[in-house]
Image (cartoon, rainbow, N blue to C red):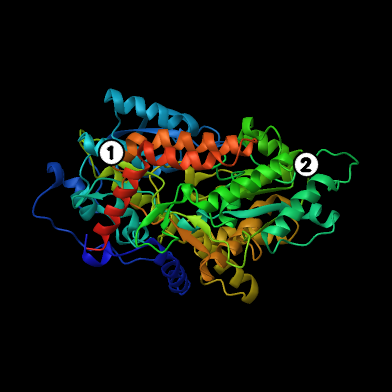
Amino acid sequence: MKHQKKKVMLISMVLALSSMLSACSSSNGNKTEAPKENKPTATVNGNPSEQSPEAKYDPPVTVTMVRDMPGGLTFPEGDTLDSNVMTKLLEQTYGIKIINNWVTDGAAYNDKLNLSIASGDLPDIFRVQATQLKQLIDAGMVADLTDVYKKNITPLADEKLRSDNGVGLSSATIDNKLMAIPYITAATEGAQMIWLRKDWLDNVGLSAPKSMDDVYKISKAFKENDPDKNGKNDTFGFGFYSNIFGGFGGMTGFFNGFHAYKNSWIKDPEGGSGLVQGNIQPEMKIALAKLQELYKSGEIDKEFSVKTADQLLTDAVNGKVGMFFGGFAEPLNKLNKAVTANPDQVWEMYPLQSIDDKPALSQVSAMPGSYWVVNKKSKNPAVIVKMMNLYVEKIFGETADFKYMYDGDFAVYQYQDVKTFGATKNLEHHLAIKEALSTGNMSKLNPEGKGYFDQVKQYQAGDKSMWRYAKIFGPEGSEAVINKYVTEKLLNYDQFYGIPSELMVDRNSTLNDLTVETFTKILLGESIDLFDKYVSDWNRLGGTEITKEVNDWLASQKK
C-alpha cells in the first residue's frame, strides 16, 4: 500500500464521511464515466472473457456458491434463490449461471462453511469472516484477485469499494496481493441508539432522555409505574437477551454510555501511544456494576440470559418491554412486527446518553463484516468482480432501478450475495429525501432514493404500512440520529482493522467465551470483583500477546 494510505486511521473517517456526504449531495449519485477500453498484453488464465468489465463469457460459464438464506426472505411466485431476477440478469449480461451447492440460515452458515473448509470441499465463490479469510490465505486455498480486479472492475464499483477511505480493500490486501473482495457498507450504521416506547413515556409523564440519569428514570418508571395502564406489574424497563453483545437488544449502547467499548481496540485512555482492549478497561467494570443493580431491581427481565432475540422481539410485540438498544434498521427488521400487531405502539429513537459531561460515543468499526473469496481452483476468478459490477450498476448506475432494491414487498437486493452499498448510501438517501420534502428539489434522489421518497410520502398520506421506511429515511427517521453522530463527531471507531493473526484466530473463541461468561455472571449477581480476575485471565490466556500484535500492526501503519 502507498505510504499515505497506510497512515489512514479510522478515527479520521468521521470527517471523511461528512465531507463525502456533502460531495455526494451535488449529484444524483447514479452516473459514472464509461469504462475505458482495456487492452491487456496477456490474458488472465488464457480467458479473453476476463479482460474487461464489458466482456461476456461465451460460451456461458457455471459457477458454484454457498449461501445463507436471510431470515424472512421471500420470492415472487416461481422464483427461488437459485432462479430470480438477479440470477437471470447475471446470465443475460455476463453469461454467468450460479448454482448454490447448499443454502442454510444465517446462524448455521459459518458452522457449515467451517466444515467445508476443513474438508476442502469448497465452491467457486463464497463469503467468509475475517478469521476464515486468514485461515484460507495461510492454507493457500483462495485465489489472488489482484489482476482480475484491475482488469474487470468498473469505475463506479471501484469507487463504492473505496468509499471507506480504502480500509476494506487494504484489509483484504496481503503482501500486496488482493485476496478477497470486502463487503463495504456504511460503518456509521453500525452505531447504536436508544429505541423506546414514546406512548409509555407520555403515560409516565417523562420526557426524552438527555443523560444516562434520565435513562435510569425512564427504566424505573417503565417497571414500576404501569406504563401500559393495564393495572398490572408486568413490564420491564430494558429489553436484553442472552447475546449481550448483539445488535438488536444487546448491551453495547449501554456500555458506550459509560465510555466502555466492547471488543474494540481503542486509544489508551491513560495517554499512552498504543491501543488497548475496551473489554478490560475500568469503565467496563463500572457499567457492569450498574447493569447488575438494574437486574436486581427487576428492571431487566430475570430470564434475559436464556432468551433468544426472537423471544425478546415477542416481548416487544406483546408490550412487555419499553426500551432497548439497537441499530438504525430496527423498524424494518424488528419493530414493524410490533407496530403492525399493535398500531397503538409508538416507538421513537434517541441518541446514546452519557453518565457524565463527556458526550457518549457510539462504537463502530470500519473493518468489513465479511469478505467474498474465490476458490484457488476456480477456472473463472473474474466472475466475482463481474457480479459486483452488475450489482453496483443496478443500484447506483445509469440503468439503476428501485425494483432491484425492493419490488413491492420482495427484498430483491438480498437475492445476490456479492454486493456493496458503499460507506454512506442510506445517510445520503435520508438527507436527499429530507431536502426533497422541504424544498421540492428531487435532483439528488437516485432511483433507490426516489423509491424511499415515495414510500415516505405514502406514509405521510396515511399508508401505515410504510411506517418502517418513513421511520428510517424520513425527516425524523433513525438516519437523523446517524447524521447527528457523523456531523457532531459522536462515533468511536475501532482502531484495529487488520486481518486477524494466527494467535488471534487461535485464542478468539476462548477469550470471547471468557468475556461473555464473566460479564453474564456479574449481571446475574456474582461479585463485581470477578471483573478483576477476568482481566488477569484475559491477559494470561493470550490477551497480552494479542495486544502486542495489535500495537505492532499499528506501528507498521505509521511507516
Q: In what element is the residue under mark 1? A: helix
The three-letter code of the residue at mark 2 reads Gly
Position in image of residue 224 (x %, y %): 83, 46
Where, quadrant-wise, is the C terminus in this rendering? bottom left
Q: Is residue 64 above or below residue 321?
A: above
At a point 46% along the width and 43% down the height, the residue shown is 535
Q: Is residue 365 left or right of residue 150?
A: right
Nearer to the camera, 504 or 56 = 504
Q: Which residue is the extreme one toward the bottom?
A: 439
Identify the image quadrant of the N terminus: bottom left
Residue at (74% x, 50% y) in the render: 219
Q: How far from the left and from the top, in percent, is residue 12?
A: 40, 67
Which residue position is annotated with label 2? Answer: 319
Q: Position of residue 348 (x, y in %)?
A: 70, 56
Per the image, label 2 sits on a secondary structure element best described as loop
Residue receiving disc 1: 502
Q: Nearer the viewer, residue 292 or 191?
A: 292
Left/right of residue 87 with respect to residue 232 in the rendered view? left
- Figure label count: 2
Q: Quadrant of residue 101?
A: top left
**In the rendered image of this protein, does residue 181 appear above or below residue 380?**
below
Residue farthest left in this picture: 41
Between discs 2 and 1, the one toward the N terminus: 2
The amino acid type, in three-letter code, at marker 1 is: Glu
56 relative position to 242: left or right: left
Residue 239 - label: none
Crowding at mark 1 (Cα within 10 Å: few <14, some 14-19, many 20+): some
Q: Is residue 54 above or below residue 4?
A: above
